[in-house]
Amino acid sequence: MHKKGKNPTRVQKVYIRDAGLNVENWLVCRQDDRYLYLIHRISGNEKQILKKGR
């Protein structure tokens, strides 16, 4: 069973867009210092993206 994802914050949306993903399709599962862990809204696929220094 997957964890429930939450809607991304404004800053998280920037990271998601920078990774070339559509913000409306991804939920944030968790994050740490380097990575943002995402779950796809429809398919349930999981992905991790690197947070770039902004």
Image (cartoon, rainbow, N blue to C red):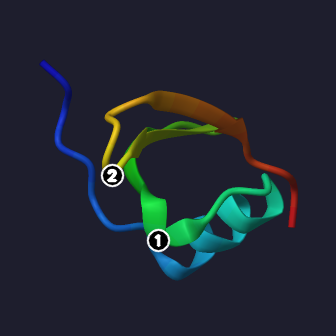
Query: Can you say which quadrant of the picture contains the C terminus?
Result: bottom right
Whether tag 1 and tag 2 are in contact, CB under 8 A, the answer is yes
Q: Nearer the viewer, residue 36 or 17?
A: 17
Query: Residue type at mark 1?
Result: Glu
Which residue occupies the extreme front position in the image? 43
Q: Residue 35's spot in the image, x, y percent?
A: 64, 36
| Picture quadrant of residue 11 | bottom right
Residue 18, compared with residue 40, is above or below; it is: below
Q: Is residue 30 left or right of residue 49?
A: left
Q: Crowding at label 2, few (<14), some or many (≥20) Cα neighbours within 10 Å? A: some
Q: Is residue 12 left or right of residue 41?
A: right
Which residue occupies the extreme bottom position in the image? 10
Q: Residue 48's spot in the image, x, y percent?
A: 60, 31
Residue 34, compared with residue 15, is above or below; it is: above
Q: Which residue is mark 1?
A: 24
Q: Residue at x 54, y 81 (%)?
A: 10
Q: Sequence order check: which comes first, mark 1 or mark 2?
A: 1
| Picture quadrant of residue 39 | top left
Q: Nearer the viewer, residue 44 or 34?
A: 44
Q: CA distance from mark 1 to mark 2?
A: 8 Å
Q: Residue at x 12, y 18 (%)?
A: 1
Q: Which mark is residue 41?
A: 2
Which residue occupies the extreme top position in the image? 1
